[in-house]
Amino acid sequence: MGHWDMETRTQSVKYRAPAVQRAFQMLKIVAESPAVYNLSDLARSLGWSKSTTHGLIQSLMTIGALEQCPQENTFVLGPAVADLAFQDWQSYRVGGAVKGILESLRDQIHETVFLGAMGRRRTLIVAVAESTKHLKLSAPPGTGIPLLAGALGKLYLSSLAPEAIERFLKENDLPRYTERSITERDRYLSEIERVCRDGYALDNEEYLAGVRAVAVSIGNRGGLPMALWVVGFAAALEMAHLVKMIDDIQKAARDIRQVVDRERKMLTVQSGEEPLFKGGAFALSYR
């Protein structure tokens, strides 16, 4: 019986599914590129026929692994990829150590603290340390936030190459969530430049009226890029006070980054394998 089990396992390890391999090849190409691909681009890059490429695109779109951009026939990673990343973080990386860091930061600044994974369409909250105030802002893990929401949108775009930022802003309208939302392209670009220079992004009632926020990047060598952000009511959180929190928030981000790296190394050692994806949105370097 033991011999049969070992033989079956050996055969299963040797088995290869071409369709599955092709699907991951396509997702890897889309994830690693700062540009967006259309059908012809993907077929040429992968060396496949257009009919084969089209069929696989349709299959991946059906399950939400790819999304088609509304402006043109180009494709980006879909929400299913971010959802899988979220489940991975819940299972392996958002452990007691990270939660402890979030709670310690919360106790220092007395506002709600969020940790999230940033995709090309939205940010997924993966952990929260709620403020202990009676009146507070919060959202449960798994909640999705639009990509261009306040500080998070600025933070995400600041991680891209300048040409990719320019292209994104030409192809996407800046949403007006509140009267304070920045919808002028040049002004938004100035905000992104400030984020690159200062290392943090601010939201002055731009996503939710009466709410301010500050966000910093954590990076992530083995998954979707991550962010740490603090949110509070504008009436009790002056911008000057928000900026004074930056040192504490950035220290917490560095501590979380160390935990993330340690957990990833442990998982790699336990599996005895290198991670499948090593680039683009799946393995952004720290900036």
Image (cartoon, helix red, strand yellow):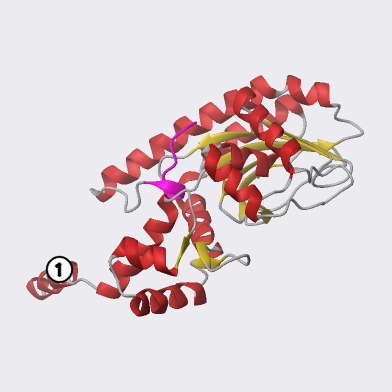
- Residue closest to the eye, 147 or 41: 41
| Residue type at tag 1 | Lys
Q: Measured from the top left, where is residue 148 in percent x and y? A: 69, 49
In the rendered image, residue 244 lying in the magenta stretch gets the answer: no
According to the picture, the residue beneath numbered tag 1 turns out to be 14
Q: Is residue 116 visible?
A: no
Question: Residue lying furthest left in this view?
Answer: 3
Residue shown at the point (76%, 47%) measured from the top left: 138
Q: Measured from the top left, where is residue 270 in percent x and y? A: 28, 47
Name the side, left or right, on which 108 lies relative to 279.
right
Mark 1 closeness class: few <14, some 14–19, many ≥20 residues within 10 Å: few
Q: Measured from the top left, where is residue 106 in percent x and y? A: 70, 32
Residue shown at the point (58%, 65%) measured from the top left: 69
Which portion, as a residue range, is magenta? 279-287
Asked if residue 148 is positioned above or below residue 66 in the image, the reply reads above
- Residue closest to the eye, 186 or 201: 186
Residue shown at the point (62%, 67%) measured from the top left: 70
Name the side, left or right, on which 227 lies relative to 107.
left
Name the side, left or right, on which 29 lies relative to 250.
left
Q: Measured from the top left, where is residue 85 in percent x and y? A: 49, 55
